[in-house]
């Protein structure tokens, strides 16, 4: 029951040929008036799809992922795929890192090296980590079984799965870090397994006002303006969240049959989160296409949206079981709100140009992780 099996990514060439053929045979929609206001512009997406078909090197990205040891194990009826990269440093801290949505473990490619081998990256070797980076259930190589398990994949269920994974790996004392969907799993893992988790570190999401008048006590004019802008951003956008929560199967047909449909949906999320289409994207297209390829080649674009249709999407939970840190925290007002329900010991002021911090600003994320766990270890 505790078996852990080595894993290596090896996509059949026939699958890559099929992807390229589908991209080249795309039946392109007519351009509607309104530019990005109507969705992803045809010219923008067409250029990106042409690069995916004829310029993007999947084998190079595959080799880069395979440079890290990978494994699978079955927990609670679900095959869990994960990277497990041991540090050469004798006092390294085990760290489970949970990726974001719509993303995959590929978002960690630029942070694993400095975290596990700081000496080799010019950093102080006194702070090092054994990194465990699982693919969330329903994402990439952690595919859902067929037929699908009817039990919902709640954040609690993922957190319990992660706790069991760390037990199987022999880690009795470990840290947890996450972004976006991972920022929901991480504090829940701390709350459920506080006996073993030494600290919960997320990139952002704590301290968002809930409407309680107490949230705004002592707020400055500038802080109130920032919160108003944040509220407008969170309430706007394409409305993808409610649709995913209500009708995910309908979208899944397009994701499974058309790589361009899947790519358009993914790029639109990056537009909403990170300002794509501005001409100064904070994440390069090879990174985005690596994630798009992983979704396509494993047919998991539909199942990866479970955080919405299972009602798990939301904000990180408060917990006082273990110390909490936030690497890209936001205003002092948000910290004051977060402190009401969390033992905040680190509130980083680093700014990221992107919601996907590990890809857009890996240096700032590495610095935040190292500083937090240096404080609490």
Image (cartoon, rainbow, N blue to C red):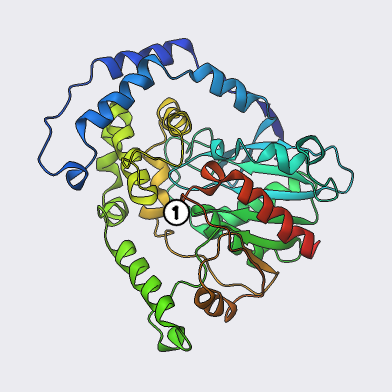
Q: Residue at x 36, y 20 (%)?
A: 51
Q: Residue furthest right?
A: 90
Q: Position of residue 79 (x, y in %)?
A: 57, 37
What is the quadrant of residue 232 in the picture? bottom left
Say how many tags the image has: 1
Location of residue 8 with respect to 303 vertically, above or below: above
Of residues 377 and 277, the one nearer the viewer is: 277
Identity of the residue drawn at 56% across and 38% down: 105
Q: Is residue 369 left or right of residue 262?
A: right
Using a 10 Å C-alpha cutoff, classify the residue at mark 1 as few (fewer than 14 neighbours), some (14 to 19) or many (20 or more).
few
Quarter-wise, where is residue 261 in the image?
A: top left
SS category of the residue bearing label 1: loop
> Residue 89, located in which quarter of the rendered image?
top right
Could you say where residue 9 lies in the image, as x and y percent from the top left? 58, 23
Left or right placement of residue 97 versus residue 44 in this view? right
Q: Position of residue 1 (x, y in %)?
A: 70, 40
Query: Residue 115: x percent and y percent?
Result: 72, 43
Residue visible at 66% across and 64% down in the picture: 190
Look at the image and tell me in which quarter the C terminus lies. Answer: bottom right
| Residue of label 1 | 152
Vertical placement of residue 81 versus 179, above or below = above
Mark yes or no: residue 9 visible.
yes
């Amino acid at each position: 029951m505790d078996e852990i099996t080595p894993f290596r990514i090896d996509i059949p060439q026939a699958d890559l040929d099929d992807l390229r053929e589908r991209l080249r045979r795309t039946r392109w929609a007519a351009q509607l008036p309104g530019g990005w206001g109507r969705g992803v512009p045809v010219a923008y997406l067409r250029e990106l799809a042409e690069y995916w078909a004829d310029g993007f090197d999947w084998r190079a990205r595959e080799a880069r992922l395979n440079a890290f040891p990978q494994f699978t194990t079955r927990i609670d009826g679900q095959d869990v795929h994960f990277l497990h990269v041991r540090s050469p440093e004798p006092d390294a801290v085990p760290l489970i890192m949970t990726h974001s949505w719509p993303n995959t473990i590929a978002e960690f490619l630029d942070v694993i090296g400095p975290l596990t081998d700081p000496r080799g990256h010019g950093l102080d070797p006194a702070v090092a980590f054994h990194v465990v980076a699982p693919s969330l259930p329903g994402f990439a190589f952690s595919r859902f079984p067929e037929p699908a398990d009817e039990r919902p994949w709640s954040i609690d269920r993922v957190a319990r799965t992660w706790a069991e994974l760390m037990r199987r790996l022999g880690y009795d004392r470990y840290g947890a870090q996450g972004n976006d969907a991972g920022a929901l799993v991480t504090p829940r893992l701390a709350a459920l397994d506080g006996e073993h988790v030494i600290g919960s570190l997320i990139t952002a999401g704590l301290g968002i006002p809930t409407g309680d008048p107490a949230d705004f006590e002592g707020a400055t004019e500038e802080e109130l303006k920032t919160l108003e802008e944040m509220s407008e951003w969170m309430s706007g956008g394409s409305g993808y969240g409610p649709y995913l929560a209500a009708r995910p199967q309908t979208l899944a047909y397009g994701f499974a049959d058309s790589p361009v449909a899947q790519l358009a949906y993914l790029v639109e999320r990056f537009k909403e989160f990170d300002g794509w289409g501005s001409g100064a994207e904070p994440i390069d297209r090879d990174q985005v296409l690596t994630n798009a390829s992983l979704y396509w080649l494993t047919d998991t674009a539909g199942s990866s949206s479970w955080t919405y249709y299972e009602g798990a999407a939301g904000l990180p939970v408060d917990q006082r079981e273990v110390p909490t840190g936030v690497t890209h925290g936001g205003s002092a007002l948000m910290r004051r709100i977060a402190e009401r329900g969390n033992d905040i010991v680190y509130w980083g002021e680093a700014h990221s140009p992107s919601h996907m911090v590990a890809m857009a600003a890996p240096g700032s994320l590495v610095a935040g992780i190292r500083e937090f766990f240096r404080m609490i270890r």
